[in-house]
Image (spheres, helix red, strand yellow):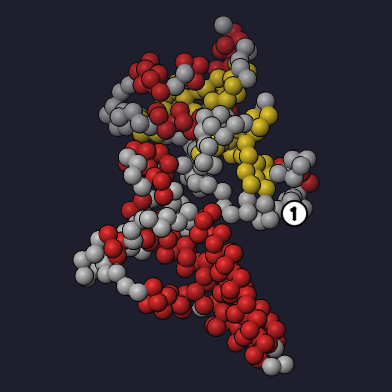
Amino acid sequence: MNSLWLIIGSLAAFAVAYRYYGAFLAAKVAMLNDARLTPAHRLKDGVDYHPTSRLVLFGHHFAAIAGPGPLVGPVLAAQWGYAPGFIWIVIGACLAGAVHDFVILLASVRQDGLSLPKIARENIGPFSGITTSIATLCRLPPDFDEASEDVQYDVRAKHGTPAPYLEVRARSLAGLVPWDGVTMGELEVRGPTVASEYYNEPAASDRMTDDGWFRTGDVVTIDVRGYIEICDRSKDLIRSGGEWISSVALENALMGHPAVAEAAVVAMAHPKWGERPLAVVVLKAGRQVSAEDLRQHLAPDFAKWWLPDSFEFVDQIPRTSTGKFLKSALRERFCGAHAETREEG
């Protein structure tokens, strides 16, 4: 076989990928804005920021764009012939190297040319800087560039939009919930990378809906832009009088009180409402606060029926091996006693 045909085939594949797949990534995933200046132009100082030709930029990034092809392709060709090597060069460059470099470059441009680990350290924390070296970073849409820091923070504090090719929806007891950023529902996902079932786990068959969506167990809200915010786990959610109360939201608010070190909220049985929230609180050393003080602290931010019925003050909250609150132990320790007391009353 003449190798010229492999070269022609590669160039044709690259052209199609650039014209259609590249355009899709730029328009739908990255949402590029041609009117937005790059850091090289906006912060031009002749030292760290210096506008240059697109050809020079392409040359700098060529190794990352084409790396998976030239590095692995010849090895495959030497072992199994030209066809596997050719396929890898085409797929590796189009779907791996080029996309990876595109996403990294985009994140850097959006953050004034910083490296990805440094972006993660400044926005998330020092440990995340290491983790994100091999991951991707959630970014704000271009039309948020001029928004206030508070508005940008509200968006960054959410868990982001779905990855390409994944569909999401949320379902409550009443059915599918609207994308209004307020109504809570259990997150369901569907896509080519979502497994259809658990391997050798018949008991987990209820995790898939009849129409093929995976039930994640995460309780979320989804706003009009598709940004997801995880509010709770379905097993920790408090279902009171047909409404849902997020234990995580109450915990975060309680830990915002200056006297509170830690707080966990669990559901306790209630004869009328089904479940009501119980807050288990650890105070900071030398600090004192009453249950009524904590209830008043929560009142401005939550509906009255969200507020915990009871508070328990403890020295420490049991945790799992991964450091999460062991809420099953809290329910076993406190909720039964409160239910018995209510029945006796």
Residue hosting label 1: 199
Disc 1 marks a residue whose amino acid type is Tyr
Q: Nearer the viewer, residue 318 or 100?
A: 100
Q: Sort mark 1 into few (<14), some (14-19) or many (20+) by Cα contacts within 10 Å.
A: few
Q: Is residue 336 above or below residue 261?
A: above
Q: Nearer the viewer, residue 294 or 196?
A: 196
Q: Residue furthest front?
A: 35
Quarter of the image containing the N terminus?
A: bottom right
Q: Position of residue 329 (x, y in %)?
A: 55, 33
Splitting the image into 4 quarters, where does residue 92 fall? bottom right
Quarter of the image containing the C terminus?
A: top right
Q: Position of residue 13 (x, y in %)?
A: 63, 75
Q: Residue at 52% of width from left, 66% of height from top? A: 99
Q: Is residue 42 above or below residue 160?
A: below
Res 196 seen here: yes
Q: Nearer the viewer, residue 222 or 124?
A: 222
Describe residue 121's horizontal placement relative to residue 96 as left or right: left
Q: Residue furthest top?
A: 345
Q: Residue at 27% of width from left, 69% of height from top? A: 50
Describe residue 341's horizontal placement relative to residue 262 as left or right: right
Res 217 seen here: no
Describe residue 186's horizontal placement relative to residue 123 as left or right: right
- Asked which secondary structure carries label 1, the reply is loop
Q: Position of residue 308 (x, y in %)?
A: 48, 20
Q: Position of residue 340 (x, y in %)?
A: 59, 14
Q: Residue at 70% of width from left, 88% of height from top? A: 81
Q: Is residue 88 above or below residue 338?
A: below
Q: Is residue 73 above or below residue 314?
A: below
Q: Residue at 37% of width from left, 17% of height from top? A: 296
